[in-house]
Amino acid sequence: MKVRNDKLYIGEKIFESQDQVISFFPSVTKCSLRGRKSQTLVCDFSSLMRSESFFPFFMLVAFEGGSILRALFLLLSCPLLFFLNFELQMKVMIFITFCGLRFKDVDRLSRAVLPKFYLENLNFLVYQILDSAGSKKVFTSVPRVMVEGFLKEYIKVDSVKGTELHTIGKYYSGFLSKSGLFLKHGTLRDDFGEKTPDIGIGSNISLLADQLFLSFCKEVYVVHKEDRKVCSRTVMPREKYPKPIIFHDARLAFLPTPLATLIMFMWLPFGILLAFFRLSVANFFPPKPANFILSLSGLILKYNLSKSVPSQKGKGVLYVCNHRTLFDPVMLSLALEKPLCAVTYTLSRFSELISPIRTVRLTRDRNHDAKIIEKSLKKGDLVVCPEGTTCKEPYLLRFSSLFAELTDEIVPVAINTNASMFHGTTTCGYKWLDPICFPMNPRVVYSVEVLEKLPKERTMGGGRSNHEVANYVQEEVAKALGFESTTLTRRDKHLMIKGI
């Protein structure tokens, strides 16, 4: 490609305008998937996404890794970004997002937060083409640290090149490295030399740099605006994910586009008041009126109860449920319309203070915890979440078998919920915010299904081992929810999030 006298030359073709150049490149829908295993494909990261804008992903880093003030500053920059060219837009977003962030925080976000949103925003058609190639390389103007982990771990890309950031000690300064904003075509020539890639896929071809990048490839395909409109209505099915998302540590439950983020900030004052109102109702009202008032506030409790389970004399019933939020035992108590006690592990003192039901703190010392649970069961019915941590996705972690050793009065409980704005739990964030964030959601549906009590022959009293009992309860809960059981544990979750 050459530029001469305000005209563009690609081979023997001469173009008078950018629109002619754009229409010259064939649509990505024309690319065949056959016979690609021996070929090399280069792709621009933006063409892998259904949306053209990188703003939501910068907002995720600013909010989850920085603070709500940093997210507000990034949102306020939107009017300015509208009047800037692409290079200046990237520099402004990078500075606001990364200035002062620690390496380890960004590393955590790249593993535990961003992949979920990338997969949900993945262009399924482009991914299929990328997956069909033997060798895959992705170039992008986005900071490499934001995309490399996802591309290599989930998309199995061989090489990722992107914008490098300037650092001071263990922190990002917010500025670019000496190499500046990443130039795709220059790096492509350095990587391949005289040997050109077989396939090139791009999207932002209104930029001269991207046109140069694509013109270096043997075959070129472009994600046109019409293609994006079609792809934006086609969400990649979860079963087609190259790797399942089981753990993620995001507080935000939505993709923070500028409009969605603005709505969130406008909602915050009302959401805080609503959260304290809902907590007050749960604390000070009896179950029936509490359920009614909470439903008027947008917190809908749907429950399906099995026949009542009488307690043995001098011993309570152990309700064993999967773990979605801190409110699981509270919602079960409201559904059953009777007081329960919940055993907890890493619950904050603030959460214990405002809890509508009694809580008992465990220590993760198996023998000591067994004594605590046995003592609590003698006082009444008890709720335990043997996953040991929350899981936001439709999967169940392995159930700890400790509960099976302590009683034969076991009732499985299947719990599910949704969050439209904020998730109720986080591993690396501020734990004291957990009981506040979830009831801040404008509308919440909590589903509680109390299953039949375990028959005698399914308990240790009936000759089963503790692991057999735990696995059976896990499968019954998974079946009721339509979730998938896993052998992953709380430890696996923390190792993934911490990158160990």
Image (spheres, rainbow, N blue to C red):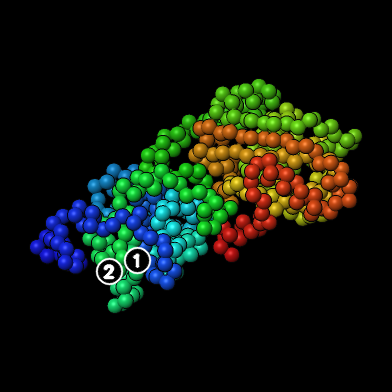
Q: Is residue 246 left or right of residue 485?
A: left
For the point 33% across and 75% down, the residue is 192
Q: Most extreme residue toward the bottom, as rendered?
A: 194
- Picture coordinates of residue 160, whole percent (x, y): 41, 66
Q: Is residue 451 visible?
A: yes
- Residue occupied by mark 1: 199
- Picture coordinates of residue 136, whole percent (x, y): 42, 67
For the point 14% across and 62% down, the residue is 14
Amino acid under label 1? Ile
Secondary structure under badge 1? strand
Amino acid under label 2? Phe
Q: Is residue 175 visible?
A: no
- Picture coordinates of residue 133, whole percent (x, y): 42, 66
Q: Most extreme residue toward the left, as rendered?
A: 5
Q: Residues within 10 Å of mark 1 (few under 14, many from 20)?
A: many
Q: If you read the primary sequence from the N terminus, does the residue marked by circle 1 or circle 2 appear first?
A: 1
Q: Residues within 10 Å of mark 2 (few under 14, many from 20)?
A: many
Q: Nearer the viewer, residue 348 or 298?
A: 298
- Picture coordinates of residue 155, whole percent (x, y): 47, 61
Considering the image in quadrants, where does the C terminus appear?
bottom right
Q: Is residue 130 left or right of residue 19?
A: right
For the point 69% across and 44% down, the residue is 479
Examine the image and state in which quarter residue 15 appears. bottom left
Check residue 265 in the rendering and tell me which mark sits there, or answer none: none
Secondary structure under badge 2? loop
Decide: marks 1, 2 in contact (CB < 8 A)?
A: no
Cα–Cα gap, marks 1 and 2 = 10 Å
Q: Nearer the viewer, residue 31 or 326?
A: 31
Q: Nearer the viewer, residue 382 or 131?
A: 131
- Residue occupied by mark 2: 216
Q: Is residue 198 above or below residue 305?
A: below
Q: Nearer the viewer, mark 1 or mark 2?
A: 1
